[in-house]
Image: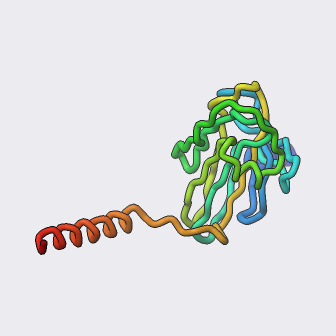
């Protein structure tokens, strides 16, 4: 009886581990596959990536990170990423022809849909779903980076403060004239 209970506990532990795909921050691009609109990402389609990943994706950030997702291979696929319970959508792209298996090239190509989400430190979970796929099935890539080498994006409050200061200067100049 005791051995049976230990076996059940061990199998439950393996099942929960198999349902989550851990990725490494700054580890590179991880490939995923999908079967068409409305479907979830599943492990596969590594191609030029460092590994494969499927839903549910987990990662731990020790500081600010960027969650980056890109379509690849054939233009036209669009995605929804649910990160920590919040939905984010990739940009909408026209259906044109293009084939690119390299995730770095695809991420920089405006013909492929992509998504970048800034996140803070902590343990995060993400699920990727396909919202549009004119070709039926395909693949893409996801990575989490610390944003090394990228320009910092100012916070909305910083932009509002800057805009208020500029508006004040313009008003002052107009009154002085």
What residue lies at 75% left-to-right and 25% top-to-bottom? 136
Q: Is residue 112 above or below residue 172?
A: above
Instruction: Tell me where residue 23 appears, x and y as whole percent.
Output: 75, 57
Q: Is residue 117 above or below residue 35?
A: below
Instruction: Tell me where residue 58 appears, x and y as whole percent.
Output: 68, 54
Judge from the rendering whether residue 29 lies leftward or rightward of residue 39; answer left or right. Answer: right
Judge from the rendering whether residue 119 lies leftward or rightward of residue 56; answer left or right. Answer: left
Is any part of residue 96 visible from this angle? yes
Q: Quadrant of the C terminus?
A: bottom left
Instruction: Tell me where residue 172 appears, x and y as whole percent.
Output: 16, 72
Instruction: Tell me where residue 104 appears, x and y as whole percent.
Output: 76, 55
What residue lies at 67% left-to-right and 27% top-to-bottom? 37
Q: Looking at the image, which is closer to me, 166 or 175?
A: 175
What residue lies at 69% left-to-right and 33% top-to-bottom? 76
Q: Quadrant of residue 159?
A: bottom left
Q: Quadrant of the N terminus?
A: top right
Is any part of residue 16 visible from this angle? no
Judge from the rendering whether residue 107 lies leftward or rightward of residue 66; answer left or right. Answer: right
- Counting the numbered discs, the total is 0
């Amino acid at each position: 009886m005791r051995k049976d209970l230990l076996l059940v506990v061990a199998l439950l532990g393996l099942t929960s581990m198999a349902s989550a795909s851990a990725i490494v921050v700054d580890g590179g691009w991880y490939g995923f596959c999908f079967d068409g609109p409305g479907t979830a990402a599943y492990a596969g389609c590594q191609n030029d990536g460092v590994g494969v990943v499927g839903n549910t994706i987990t990662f731990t950030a020790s500081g600010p990170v960027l969650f980056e997702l890109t379509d690849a291979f054939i233009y036209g696929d669009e995605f929804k990423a649910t990160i920590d319970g919040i939905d984010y959508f990739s940009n909408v792209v026209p259906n044109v022809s293009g084939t690119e298996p390299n995730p770095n090239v695809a991420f920089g190509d405006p013909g492929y849909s992509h998504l970048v989400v800034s996140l803070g430190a902590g343990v995060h979970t993400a699920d990727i779903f396909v919202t549009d796929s004119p070709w039926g099935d395909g693949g893409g890539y996801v990575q989490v980076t610390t944003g090394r080498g990228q320009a910092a994006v100012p916070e909305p409050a910083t932009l509002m403060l800057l805009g208020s200061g500029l508006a004040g200067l313009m008003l002052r100049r107009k009154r002085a004239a």
